Amino acid sequence: VTGTTDGTQTINYAVSGTDQYEYTPLASGSITIQAAKTFTPPTYPTLGNGVTSASLTMSISAVPTSSVTITPSGTGLTFNPTSLTFTSGGGTSATWTVTGTTNGAQTISYAVSGTDQYEYTPLASGSITIQAAKTFTPPTYPVLGNGVTSASLTMAVSAVPSTSVTI
């Protein structure tokens, strides 16, 4: 059954066929359709290969009556924790981190399970980009005499940052 109009809807039954008169007619029934609850996935950052993200927040529009669990997955991606469970006594947001080990754009799929999973609009797939980790190469430090100042030392980077980096 797929409901498209919120509220209580009447279900009527029609019996047909040659032997229809051998059966007691069915009484009408009803079903209540409520607006679907939704998930709001995090905005995923671009990560360096092997680098763990900051905490990312998954939100739900309403606390479930019982429980609903979201389990993300993707090639070369590790989520911590591996799933988020929302319960009737809990809040409407939870966090996880992600670490990627396969370079490129990676699709994130979500499995939704639990007693109340059908009250929520299914989650669309997300995406995260994993790129080769940028590195710093420290300078070679000279041996200095006591009180002697060295010449300038240069630190190298494998790629120029898009913003600033302070060491």
Image: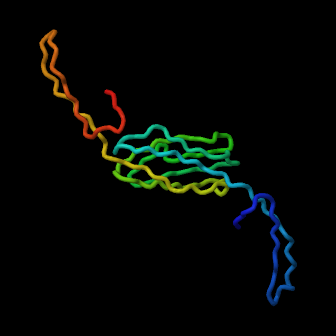
Instruction: Specify the farthest residue to the top.
Output: 147
Of residue 25 and residue 108, the one placed in the foreground of this image is 108
Q: Quadrant of the C terminus?
A: top left
Q: Give x and y (percent) for residue 60.
A: 62, 46
101 sits to left or right of 7: left
* Corner quadrant of residue 111: bottom right
Q: Quadrant of the N terminus?
A: bottom right
Residue at horizontal 78%, vertical 62%? 31
- Image coloring type: rainbow
Residue at horizontal 87%, vertical 78%? 24
Q: Give x and y (percent) for residue 134.
A: 29, 40
* Corner quadrant of residue 87: top right
Of residue 106 and residue 150, the one placed in the foreground of this image is 150
- Asked if 122 appears above or below 139 in the picture, the reply is below
Q: Give x and y (percent) for residue 162.
A: 35, 39
Q: Give x and y (percent) for residue 98.
A: 44, 44
* Corner quadrant of residue 3: bottom right
Residue at horizontal 43%, vertical 50%? 128
Residue at horizontal 66%, vertical 51%? 37
